[in-house]
Image: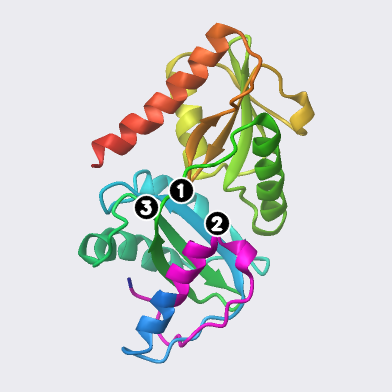
Amino acid sequence: MTNTKGMTMPQIDDAELFGNAEDQRAYEDFCANQEAVEKFTLDKPALVCRWRMSNKKVPMLNRHIRALSERLVQGEPLTHNMLSWAKQHVEWSLAEGDYTAHDGVLMLVIDINGNAAMTVGEYEPLADTSAKALRARSAEARSEADETGVAPELLAAVNNGELAFVAPADECLCGTATLIEQLAQTKGISVTRVDIPAQLKGALFLVSDEHGVVPAADADAAESDAATVAFFADGYEKLRARRS
């Protein structure tokens, strides 16, 4: 992968910004390799986007870029040049890149100065998909949204045939959530938003730019509501398959 102009070796101390140690090592290896090409500097990460890949492509790229355009770094929106760079490098560099994680995760890292880099890591499914674990991930993503304006993961539920997201009414949804919203509309399913997770009832699931649709393993829900969540999950996977 390539980097924005004028960056040299980064100093990354915030391991919690990456999904796991392997992702952080992949990112640091990428940065180290860049030194052979040009001096590369990335300051403290302010935003890390994690987008699932399929056969060296990023499904829903336009949705992800639209959500990226609504994100803030240090209180400011990303520049048009940054958005163009991100889209072009995903479209061009992924296909040409020499890496093994063809169905992995693309990581876009933007530092506090507005500089950016991309790298690819292996995909690892969630080890814990209990309702408690999904609620915890949603809470972490909500904290990120408080700073960047967009949550990369949302808690959602289908109850009595209605879909609800935990998100402010005026907040831009992440790319995967916009797909689920559109799938619901094709089925005539009403979509609402609630303020707190405790307001959700029915078939609980996580909507994630990295993991797609993740139903809670221990959800106590009506069969019809669980089937609707399965419909969302299947729609997401079919879209990924079309890009393979």
Q: Amino acid at mark 3?
A: Gly
Query: How far from the left and from the top, in percent, is residue 25?
Result: 47, 70
Disc 1 and disc 3: Cα gap in Å? 8 Å
Residue beneath disc 2:
19
* First along the sequence among labels 1 and 3: 3
State yes or no: residue 17 in magenta.
Answer: yes
- Locate residue 206: give its quadrant: top right
Q: Secondary structure at mark 1?
A: loop
Dot 2 falls on a residue whose secondary structure is: loop
Q: CA distance from mark 2 to mark 1?
A: 9 Å
Q: Residue drawn at (35%, 82%), measured in percent from left and top?
A: 33
Residue wearing tag 1:
124
Circles 2 and 1: CB atoms closer than 8 Å:
yes
User: Residue 113 in the image: x percent, y percent?
Assistant: 59, 79
- What SS does tag 3 mark? loop
Front one among 49 and 217: 217
For label 2, the crowd category at 10 Å Cα-Cα, with few meaning under 14, some 14 to 19 and many 20 or more, is some
Q: Let me know if residue 81 appears in the view.
A: no
- Which residue is depicted at the point 40% across and 32% down? 236
Q: Is residue 222 magenta?
A: no
Horizontal relation, residue 196 to residue 163: left or right: right
Q: Amino acid at mark 1?
A: Glu
Eyeballing the image, is 226 above or below 110? above
What distance separates the C-alpha of mark 3 from that of mark 2? 12 Å
Q: Are marks 3 and 2 in contact (CB under 8 Å)?
A: no
Foreground mark, 1 or 3? 1
Q: Which residues are magenta?
A: 2-28
The residue tagged 3 is 104
Tell me the kind of residue under disc 2. Gly
Q: Position of residue 211 (x, y in %)?
A: 48, 42
Tell me which numbered mark, 2 or 1, is placed earlier along the sequence: 2
| Mark 3 crowd level (few <14, some 14–19, many ≥20, 10 Å Cα) | many
